[in-house]
Amino acid sequence: MGEMKSLFTNKNFTLLMIGQVISFTGSIIQRFALSLYVLGITGSGTLFASVLVMSLIPTILLGPIAGVFADRFSRRNIMIVLDILCAIIVGVMLLLSKNGLLDLPAIYIGVILLSVFTAFYEPAVQASIPSLVEEKQLLNANSLNSLFMTLANMTGPILAGILYGTFGLDALLLINGISFLLAAILEMFMVIPQTIRAKSSSIVSDFGNDLKEGLKFVGKSQYLGKLIFATLIANVFISPIFTVGIAYITKINLKMSDQMYGLSEGVIMAGSLMAPIALSLLTKKLTVKNAFVSMLFLSGIFLLATSGSILPSFTSIFRDATIPFWIFTICGFGIMASITILSIVGMTMLQNDTPNEMLGRVMALVTSMTMAAIPLGQLMYGLLFDRFSDSSYIPMVLSAIVSVILSLYIKFALAGYEHDASAPKNPDSTSA
């Protein structure tokens, strides 16, 4: 933990984290509050969900273009401009709400615009982190970033519910608009080293070439393609266990109450909070590659244990499902911690193996592909849990097998990977 604390002596990194937390939390609060507002005025669960879904689409579709922006323009200026634009959009929505004009079309337009800005914001942040810390600090920097984003994801919906329920939509919009402006002001004091390429006369041609260059780089890289492949497979076969499996198994198979389901979700989510702390200890003994392999293998073991906890032959031993429930939940905590560590380590490996001037494109491509893989996995596992409703351990065993096979694949596919510490990639880069 001492290494993580030392990062806060880095003014630019600290400002980046504070600005990102304010902006990201504001986006989450905005999204959930508007969803609650839509639910309140329409009573429609479908329209409620549609607001959440629409907020994800721009990230998937615009990610690659956003990555080119992050490489071609000042990342610091991108963050500042986008936070100001978010404040303006929120301000317009506040004015519409004050005058009784905030209808569904206006909400959808606002949500889409805010999501577009977020899609361009995230690659700029991810590409900036390696420029602000020493390479030996990169893993800890990504761990802190993951910790803050997890906290934002957990507290954002809670804050949205409290603020919306207590003060109403107008007050929430006002607070959110001010928070975006505050983030922009903080970001003005950052200095982010970056090499900005000269622009040609054709902007469209530049963007097309930059995008092709990013794809070509990933394709030719000895390790990146294999790492991205493993990440995609993990998002299809492991991530849905949390979004689909927990609710299904807890409510349908174990027949637990809503309160116990909420408790299970809370305990499992705590695994993502503990992951950065565990990682700081883990990497003292393992290289980043071995940590990646170990976490994949460990998640497979935990998945096998969870499948065992819901076997009919096991649950029938007990008078009720309390003990199987807690075994399932504790193993879920272990899976979440393993997957979070896996994500942090994978991000660090991608950043280590990508030149600074291409980081935006590569990170955005990876984000778009992995986010597109998640709904595919959710749909597949929804069908699997319906098909094996009386044998829910079968989809869990499938995930466990894939996880273990994937760990063996990475172990051999990245056999020559040795990039835990080296010289900075761009010592002559300029500041932006």
Image: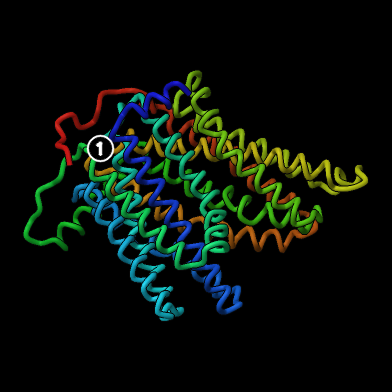
**Vertical arrangement, residue 333 with respect to residue 250, above or below:** above
Q: Quadrant of the C terminus?
A: top left
Expressed as whole percent of the image width and height from the top left, the position of residue 378 reads 58, 59
Expressed as whole percent of the image width and height from the top left, the position of residue 166 reads 56, 61
Residue linked to disc 1: 355
Q: Is residue 212 visible?
A: no
- Viewed as shown, does residue 13 lie left or right of 142? left
Q: Hey, which residue is sitting farthest left in the picture?
A: 201
Expressed as whole percent of the image width and height from the top left, the position of residue 26 reads 42, 55
The 10 Å Cα crowd at callout 1, few under 14, some 14 to 19, many 20 or more, is: some
Task: State the SS at label 1.
Answer: loop
**Vertical arrangement, residue 37 with respect to residue 329, above or below:** below
Who is closer to the viewer here, 36 or 146?
36
Total number of numbered labels?
Answer: 1
Q: Which residue is located at x 38 percent, y 73 percent?
A: 109
Who is closer to the viewer here, 248 or 208?
248
Amino acid at circle 1: Pro
Q: Which residue is located at x 46 percent, y 41 percent?
A: 148
Q: Which residue is located at x 60 percent, y 77 percent?
A: 44
- Viewed as shown, does residue 349 lie left or right of 396? left
